[in-house]
Amino acid sequence: MVNFRNRIAWVTGASSGIGKEIALALAREQAHLILSAKSPEELEVVASECRKYTSFCHEVPFDLSDPEEVERIAKSVVNTYGHIYLLINNGGISQRSLAVETPVEIDRKIMEVDYFSHVIITKTVIPGMIEAGVGYIAATSSISGKFGFMYRSAYAAAKHAIQGFFETLRVELKPHNISVTIAYPGRIRTNISLHALDKEGNEYGKMDPGQSNGLAPQKCAKRYIRAVKRRKPEILIGKSELLMVHIKRLLPSLFYKMVSRVNPV
């Protein structure tokens, strides 16, 4: 199984939650880290922890909702660091609002952050991977990328788009020895619901009960990285909520009855 020691790994959404734990796990392998998130201050805290294990840890903060900035930063990272051996597309934002009450501007913002930013970054690093003859790409989707769920219409749409794009990319890049893994976390104990957007575009500010009782992000990161190393096409990560994915596939009628009864917040 591959080791990322002395390999350049770029992690977005690295300031908290799953991204933070992935960054720390890679640091313990002494990977050469590039860490990105919106908040420079929060990113610096994570980078300081990572530097306990690896001397190569650079912070590149930027806003995933700004496509021009995303493209500029992606090109800058590639020009500065060259071949990105491992790319973890993890940055994202969730939603807590009914579709009918949500302005299209919020839908667009969520799509920019959760989908288009990943596409821009990935397309920028691919040529270097092809030239080097090797690469690892991962994208964080969600079980909302497997089925729709109340109060998450734009979020679910973005995560379904992640599945379509990266599944296609996996087939296209296989001849170049580049693997693509999609991670589908369920309820992970992070602050994602706190920062989710409501119908006004403000932070939701509440912790979902299911989220607070979810899988520890450290365990999520461990399973995530193991799947990437094993070049797995996809991995579901979570607890009992993952059963809903299998129920939808095997017993769709039962699934739709069940999902309408689940408390979504």
Image (spheres, rainbow, N blue to C red):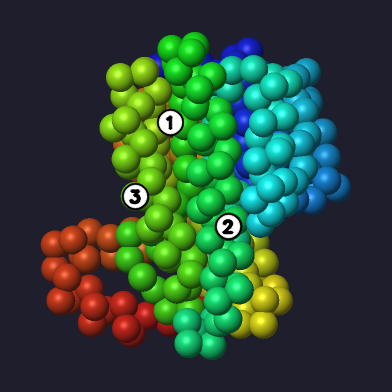
> Could you classify mark 3 by the number of other residues whose Cα lies within 10 Å: few (under 14), some (14-19), or many (20 or more)?
few
What whole-number distance in Å separates the C-alpha atoms at marks 2 and 3?
16 Å
User: Residue at the spot x=79%, y=51% of the render?
Assistant: 39
Q: Nearer the viewer, residue 247 or 214?
A: 247
User: Residue at the spot x=65%, y=61% of the render?
Assistant: 191
The image quarter in which residue 253 lies:
bottom left
Q: Earlier in the sequence, mark 2 or mark 3?
A: 2
Which amino acid does the dot numbered 3 rest on? Gly
Which amino acid does the dot numbered 2 rest on? Glu
User: Which mark identifies residue 228?
Assistant: 1
Which amino acid does the dot numbered 1 rest on? Val
User: Which mark identifies residue 115?
Assistant: none
Residue mark closest to the camera, 3 vs 1: 3
User: Which mark identifies residue 112?
Assistant: 2
Q: Position of residue 218 (x, y in %)?
A: 57, 43
Residue 122 drawn above or below residue 85: below
User: Which mark identifies residue 164?
Assistant: 3
Residue 262 drawn above or below residue 141: below
What whole-number distance in Å separates the C-alpha atoms at marks 2 and 1?
24 Å
Q: Is residue 22 visible?
A: no
